[in-house]
Image: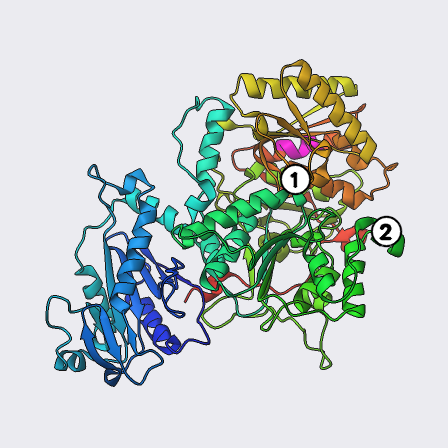
Amino acid sequence: MNFVSSGYRADHSGTDAEREVWNRLKSAFGPSDVGVAYHRYPIVDRTAGEYDREMDFLLFLRDAGAVVIECKGYQMDHVRAIEGDKWILRGTAQSSAAPYSQARDQGFKLLSHFTKEPELMDERHNHEVSMNPLVALPNITREEWEARGFHEGPSAPPVLTADDLTPTALRERIRSLPGDGLTDDEYEAARAVLSGGQPISGERRPNLKDEATKGGLYERVEKGLNRLDEKQEAVGLQIPDGPQQIRGIAGSGKTVLMAKKAARMHAAHPEWDIALTFQTRSLYETITEKVERYYAFFTSGDADPNWEKFHVLHGWGGRKRHGLYYRIAQEAGVTPRTYGDAQDEFGEEDGNLLHSCCLEVLEEGVVQESYDAILIDEAQDFDPGFYKLCRAALRPPKRLVWAYDEAQNLQTLSAPSPTNVFGTDEAGDPLVDLRGSYEGGVQKSQIMRKAYRTPRSVLMLAHALGMGLLRDGGAVQAITTQEGWENVGYEVESGDFRKYGESVELVRPSEHSPHPLADETAASPFATFQSFADRDDEIEWVADRIAEDVTDHALAPERIMAVPLGEYWTSKQTGERLAEELDARGVTPNLVWEGSKDVFAEEGEVTVSRVNRTKGNQAAMVYVLGVEHVEDDSRRADLVQRRNEAFVAITRTEAWCTVTGTGDDEPVFHEIEDITRQVSWFDPALTFPAPHPDDLEREMDDGSQATTIDQFAD
């Protein structure tokens, strides 16, 4: 049995009653029960009162279906009369209420989502999932209730009194409700709906392609990636009462979670001013679509988001589309700077231009507290000044939520600790303390170890190459502790990181990389490498493979991405030459740098992009060209950044990645071949010498505090 709480409402008079019922549910149901219990499951009734917009509790059991529970903290004297669905009250904030009809209506809204799943409807289009609404009254005994005669008559509401909330009585009451249980397949389908799978996947489509082709196999990937696991589900539903940090490995679903969490906040609190911001401008369409789908899910499609209160904003923005920095600066009385203005003011070599602009606003302006929540996706790509500006623009309790990739940043692989970002107060205590949890078990810091998007072998290749773990000259950057590797989903099979230079073996358990094609032999290999003596040969070979992907393997062109590495002009020239070769083969290329900065993939076209525009975007098949550039000392980018670029490019794939390079016996080619050999076994492992921190360009352990959801499962 899994328990998912969205946290308690501090301003709600019924919080004590909710806490009591929640604890009773956790006492009554345990590990042997197949199901999930939600506290404040966000199916929102927009017509309800201020405090009754969403379910208090949803109990979903394989053997009993859905039980929707509306909780009321009334004493017996508060209920003067019950007239049909209407309860006449006295001595409370409301003069009347309709708790049973509220639970019933919310239950019907929930069932409407199940109609989209054929497995959950019978041949007469009736729901296979039974639904029973109840009203919980933890402060009223059965004797008191029956003494008033409220249990009699055809319209008597089904209630759970204090007597019904003991573990044994509660289990018996739930088991006795009318309706049949579900088969395992029906239960799994229903759980996928409850977890939020429909807003990710949209309309269901039949299998149209031969599963022996990449196109057919990728259809399975699309379906397999459209279900949230228990941790993703819980994090996406939580509304923290202050700052929250979400740390996760590449492909762990953070962008989906941020869209879900933001839509959840907007549905539950339409009066709030909310901003969801990010670094990659081409994510506008993707993020907006996900927010719209989740908002429709939570409100049963009653209305579109209120775009006057909910804002999807690029972190900086542009001349035609203002970003979050621009808006905050304007309200603070400081003229926002364009990128060119910032270069002129802070220096062309300043790699932290947005950081400098944000600090300028904080120092020279009066930042207005205009937002109730700000959510930052791709947080690893923002500098401390942006975090500080966002926090300053928030009303108490400073609900800043940021999600960043562990070991993924175009500039650095370590994310700063909250203390390094926000600083300390006069007593030396952190201004933002992420230790522990808020009331109700909403953790202040989360770690997402599971990588769904990128196959295990490809992710291991990306980590090893990005850090240079098997590099002839030694690692460039690395995680240097067992705990650090465990935080990104690895286990130390043998060796000791404290014994520098001695062999260490890492494995990545399959449960931390549950890719939909993990056990499909026909889909492997996921990671391949090919080298060439001549650049033209490399480009022509990649063009041939892409043409085969489209014509022979039924991959839609927009599901294919080519990422040339190297300096600006070098990578651009490689991309343009590849586009010419694709055209010659009847395949339409999409040179991303020639289109709108707000758009990435184009339907019917193969995406060709430099690595800086790929962030946040994915494809079924990714080709990374020019990998020799990671060791090109003539490049202006430092060695760390060059390795990071390769990591980012490789992890854009949702299935297959082919890395290519040009050169004569380049050391990096042997490095990649060695890595590929190690990670291509059925049970892959990485073996490399434990690096000494002093020998690294950058040590990746940042010392920030984090907790895991398992610590608060009870």
Three-letter amino acid code at the position of disc 2? Gln
The C terminus: image quadrant: bottom left
Name the residue beneath numbered marker 1.
462
Coloring scheme of the render? rainbow
User: Does 667 appear above or below 161?
Assistant: above
Tell me what residue is drawn at x 41 percent, y 38 percent: 203
Tell me what residue is drawn at x 19 percent, y 75 percent: 82
681 with respect to 6 (left or right): right
- Quick check: is 570 in the magenta stretch? no
The image position of residue 307, as x and y in percent, is 55, 54
372 with respect to 50 (left or right): right
Image quadrant assignment for residue 308: bottom right
The image position of residue 484, as x and y in percent, is 63, 55
Image disc number at residue 686: none
Camera-side residue of 196 and 89 = 89
Sooner in the amino-acid sequence: mark 2 or mark 1: 2
Q: Is residue 666 visible?
A: no
Name the residue beneath numbered marker 2.
343
Camera-side residue of 237 and 681 = 237
* Neighbourhood count class around disc 2 (C-alpha, 10 Å): few under 14, some 14–19, many 20 upward: some
Q: Is residue 560 visible?
A: yes
The image position of residue 464, as x and y in percent, is 67, 41
User: Marks 2 and 1: which is nearer the front?
Assistant: 2
Three-letter amino acid code at the position of disc 1? Ala
Q: Secondary structure at mark 1?
A: helix
The region drawn magenta spans 672-677
Tell me what residue is drawn at x 86 percent, y 51 percent: 343
